[in-house]
Amino acid sequence: MEFPVCSFDLKSGIFCPKCEAKIRSGEVTELDVQVMKLLQELERSISQLGGLSYRKSVQSGEVVFVVLGEGSLARLTPPQQAMVRKKISEKLKANVRLVEDSRDINKFIQSLVAPARITMVNRIWLPDQSEEMRVVLNDERSLRIRREVVEDVVGRVKGVTVRIDFERRGRRRGF
């Protein structure tokens, strides 16, 4: 499996100067190191993990998002994906979602919000020269995670400010 740090360093637990610099700069976090070690262990039992690439892990709320390289999830069968999620979830004591990275930010957001569908994306330029994306989803009820979590994960992985809105809101019963 392809990692942002040396495989030997992960096995030994002693990082070379190059990998140590990535950890000190925050490019690689302690959560990343834990997840990479777990994936390295799982690679022994699931040989298909060998051809995948790991990008980053982000914890938002009670969910850990493991971001893998583009095309990585297609190489794993659904039972293998479930096994990877389960093993990481047991070790970290948190829910785990495997997400595929993409150069196209819309595809990345779609993988986070599935089964909800993106119906519209707007880029908003603010007076302070910053840029924000407004992503409109089809239905609030089909979003399985909180909108704040999606906004947080996209911001931390892609470095883009995102605001999630909905075409239709969940219907409330009663008064």
Image (cartoon, rainbow, N blue to C red):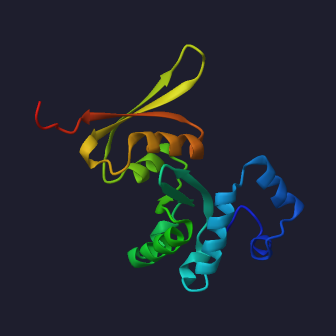
Residue farthest top in this picture: 127
The x, y position of residue 105, in whole percent, is: 50, 44
Q: Is 73 in front, or is 172?
A: 172
Q: Quadrant of the C terminus?
A: top left
State the residue lying farthest toward the right. Answer: 17
Q: Quadrant of the N terminus?
A: bottom right
Q: Residue 168: x and y, percent?
A: 22, 35
Answer left or right for 76 relative to 114. Answer: right
Picture residue at 43% right of the left edge, 51% below the top: 112
Q: Is residue 123 above or below residue 22?
A: above
- Answer above or below: position of 164 versus 89: above
Q: Residue at the spot x=71%, y=61% of the render? A: 4
Q: Residue at x 72, y 50 (%)?
A: 27
From the viewer's side, name the closer residue of 117 and 41: 41
Location of residue 100 with respect to 105 vertically, above or below? below
Does residue 1 appear in the picture of this structure? no
- Can residue 5 be spotted in the picture? yes
Q: Position of residue 116 (x, y in %)?
A: 31, 48
Give the total number of marks visible in the rendering.
0
Seen at 30% across and 35% down, the residue is 166
Most distant residue in the left direction:
174
Q: Is residue 70 left or right of residue 163?
A: right
Above or below, comparing residue 119 to residue 28 in the picture: above
Q: Position of residue 76 (x, y in %)?
A: 47, 74
